[in-house]
Amino acid sequence: MIATNLRNPGGNIIGVQTIGSIEKALEWHTLALPTVKKILVPYNQSDMSASGGLEDLEKAAEKLGITLVTRRVESPAELRAVFANIPPGTGAIWLVPSNFLDSHYQLFVEASKTHKLPVATSTAVFSSINPFLSYSPDLEAMGKQASRIVGKILKGIHPGDIPIEQAEFFLKINMAVAHELGIAVPEEILRQADAIIR
């Protein structure tokens, strides 16, 4: 983190913080899929956000008794190879924050359909990316937050005097994917979801 004080960041630092959703996302995943104890996690080493997200995911998985099968990928071909050799007993696929992985999300979709494995994430994703479960900031809502911050600057407030805002997180369940994969989502989870895609 660049700013040491979120309420008074100082300098010219402004923004919306998205830290804090990974552990909760994995908790929601465990509640939605209690029998899944092994999750495949492809990651791209050169993507700094992916590396940080992977570390947080590993800590959360250890707390929850989940085994992560991590696989480093540097190209679409390597990602295809990972999906072609998914270890036995794997119950889901996790999408870590990564521009590289987002740009090749269709490979996640294909793997999900081929192996009947749900995809989950804690990263803000575009509407074209529809994982089974996501607990993450909404890009449109983050855009509105950022617009409010810019508005304050245009009114003459110094950037360093504007608190860095915390993004709001939303639990989304894709029931269309759940039906396709034969997943029965507990009613308790559906009642608490912020959005249900059908």
Image (cartoon, grey):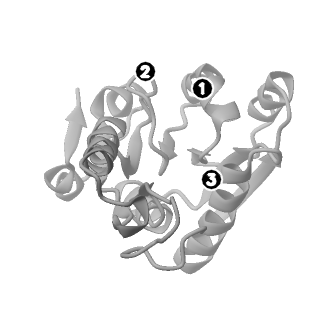
Q: Looking at numbered disc 1 in the image, what kind of residue is underneath it? A: Tyr
Please state which of residues 100 and 111 is positioned toward the viewer in this rendering: 100
Residue 185 coordinates in the image, percent (x, y): 29, 47
Sooner in the amino-acid sequence: mark 1 or mark 3: 3
Sooner in the amino-acid sequence: mark 3 or mark 2: 3
Instruction: Check the picture and name the quadrant holding the N terminus.
Output: bottom right
Please state which of residues 93 and 85 is positioned toward the viewer in this rendering: 93
Q: Which mark is residue 177?
A: none
Q: Which mark is residue 105?
A: 1
Residue 159 shows in the view: yes
**On the rendered structure, is 173 left or right of 82?**
left
Q: Residues within 10 Å of mark 1 (few under 14, many from 20)?
A: some
Please state which of residues 128 and 39 is positioned toward the viewer in this rendering: 128
Q: In the picture shown, does residue 193 fall above or below 113?
A: below
Q: In the picture shown, does residue 176 fall above or below 172?
A: above
Sooner in the amino-acid sequence: mark 2 or mark 1: 1
Residue 177 quadrant: top left
Tell me which residue sits at (42%, 54%) in the image.
33
Q: Looking at numbered disc 3 in the image, what kind of residue is underneath it? A: Ile
Q: Which residue is mark 2?
A: 128
Q: Which residue is mark 3?
A: 39
Secondary structure of the residue carrying tag 2 is loop
**Furthest-left residue in view?**
191
Residue 89 shows in the view: no
